[in-house]
Amino acid sequence: MHDDDLPDVPTSETDDRFPSGTWVGYFIQWNSRSRTELDLFFKDGLISGAGADWVGEFIVKGRYQIDDGKCWWTKRYLKGHDVAYQGYAEGKGIWGLWEIPQIAGRGGFHIWPKGSPEGDAVEAEEAEPVTTVVFETV
């Protein structure tokens, strides 16, 4: 069998909600948005990658589901702590919540593929005030 006879096998996810490549966005902490940039790879339900923000450089490992768009991953800072992320991809990036259980820290986030039209619209919205939701444990 020759290579020409083999079927084309995608090297990354084919679902449009999960394009591998550079993603940008923000996380909300202390009532302000902090920029983040990530290089993410999506394939067979697994997320991997690396990135950086004001805290430092980090790696990303996690999972995603095609059927409902649910995603969850751990962002591990190379010189620090872990942050748990959980969210949903719905065509305009991934939205959700991050959490650092050890310090009861949590907040929202939104990331999107760099250069996407949806991302450009979000960039324009960033000048608007941010509403922060605070959850209390009962």
Image (cartoon, helix red, strand yellow):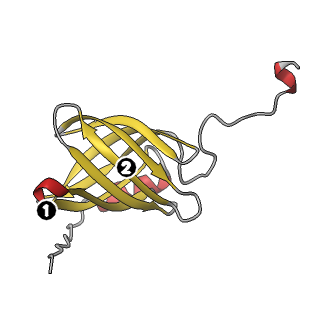
Q: Residues within 10 Å of mark 1 (few under 14, many from 20)?
A: few
Instruction: Pick whichever of labels 2 and 1 is earlier in the sequence.
Output: 1
Q: In this view of the protein, which residue sits in the foreground, 8 or 33? A: 8
Instruction: List x then y, in percent, for residue 68.
Output: 54, 65
Q: In this view of the protein, which residue sits in the foreground, 110 or 130? A: 110
Instruction: List x then y, in percent, for residue 27.
Output: 25, 54
The quadrant of the picture occupied by the N terminus is: top right
The quadrant of the picture occupied by the C terminus is: bottom left
Res 52 → quadrant: top left
Relative height, residue 8 to residue 64 (above, below): above
Identify which amino acid the numbered label 1 is placed on.
Asn
Q: Nearer the viewer, mark 2 or mark 1?
A: 2
Residue lying at 14% horizontally and 54% vertically, measured from the top left: 102
Res 110 → quadrant: bottom left
Residue lying at 19% horizontally and 70% vertically, measured from the top left: 132
Instruction: List x then y, in percent, for residue 51.
Output: 32, 35
Instruction: List x then y, in percent, for residue 13.
Output: 60, 44
Identify which amino acid the numbered label 2 is placed on.
Trp
Q: In this view of the protein, which residue sits in the foreground, 25 or 5? A: 5
Left or right relative to 96: residue 40 = right
Q: Secondary structure at mark 1?
A: loop
Q: Residues within 10 Å of mark 2 (few under 14, many from 20)?
A: some
As drawn, the residue found furthest toward the top would be 2
Relative height, residue 112 to residue 39 (above, below): below
Q: Secondary structure at mark 2?
A: strand
Q: What residue is disc 1 on?
A: 31
Q: What residue is disc 2 on?
A: 73
Left or right relative to 72: residue 108 = left
Q: CA distance from mark 2 to mark 1?
A: 23 Å
As drawn, the residue found furthest toward the bottom would be 138
Count numbered badges in the picture: 2
